[in-house]
Image (cartoon, rainbow, N blue to C red):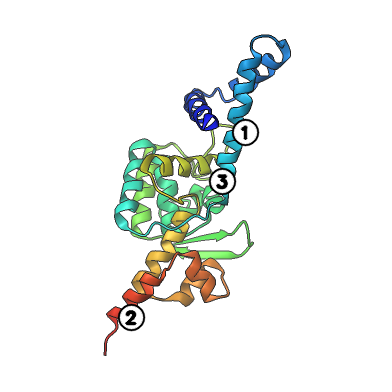
Amino acid sequence: MILNVIYYIFYYIQKTLQTLYLQGFFAILIYNSKKTNVKCNIFYTFCKLYYIQKYRFIKGNMNKTTEPVRNMKTINNILSYLKGKSSRDYLIAKTQLNTAFRISDVLQLKVSDFLTANGEFKDWLTVKEKKTSKIRRIAINSSLQSALAEYLNETNLSYDDYLFPSRKGENKPISTTQAHRIFQDIAETLHIDNFGSHSLRKSWGYFAYKKTKNIALIMETYNHTREKVTLRYIGIQQKDHDDLYNQIKF
């Protein structure tokens, strides 16, 4: 109980500090308080307990299986929240929803992947998957095109720039760690359980299956070899099977 109280107090303090780009502040205080070996040792102990609890919290979240979002209302709430917060974060979510890419592949996208040298949209997006090294070629639908056009009008990105550039380093994308924080913030703010950076990728498969029942094509999209694996991955439950059987009547 005491550890939980300590964790949440320091969690909100640190979150404020992160906003001000002072992430190293806690580490410096811990080091100095330990070095002086005076009354600050109390502060050092509290900081140490905080980070122990934070490690447990993060490890617990990592061990949780992420689930797809199964209703459009929640999807729209996520997109509305992100659009009001950051056009970059909104486009990350919009891209993952419309491509079913892993977050690592979304972050590697460049302006040139979507546009020709003349500034016109390509019909197809061709990407080499980071994890499997397989080539994926997918159509760029109108919804994603519209979101991209709005985003590119707001930014000053060049043809060879990463779509989601980091503030650190020249022409580098944001890190997967930073992307995970975006999704963690969504989960905390909108109170969505088992939500993470894989959830929107899984949501694409869930809604594709509900609409088409074309499990073979969905398996191919995810590079799965077994139907059972894909159904479990996209969160198809017994209730979904029951609904299907209730719809098919002879």
Badge 2 or badge 3: first in the primary sequence? 3
Q: Which residue is mark 3?
A: 60
**Depth order, front residue of 2/39:** 2
Q: Which residue is mark 1?
A: 52
Q: Quadrant of the C terminus?
A: bottom left
Q: Residue 245 — which label? A: 2
In the figure, 73 relative to 89: above or below? Answer: below
In the image, 236: left or right of 38?
left
Badge 3 or badge 1: first in the primary sequence? 1
Image coordinates of residue 28 in percent, x first then y, are 65, 19
Instruction: Please name the amino acid that badge 1 sits on.
Output: Ile
In the figure, 183 relative to 72: above or below? Answer: above
Report crowding for label 1: few under 14, some 14 to 19, many 20 or more residues within 10 A (C-alpha). few
For numbered disc 1, what is the local secondary structure?
helix
Image coordinates of residue 127 in percent, x first then y, are 55, 59
Nearest to the eye among marks 2 and 3: give it. Answer: 3
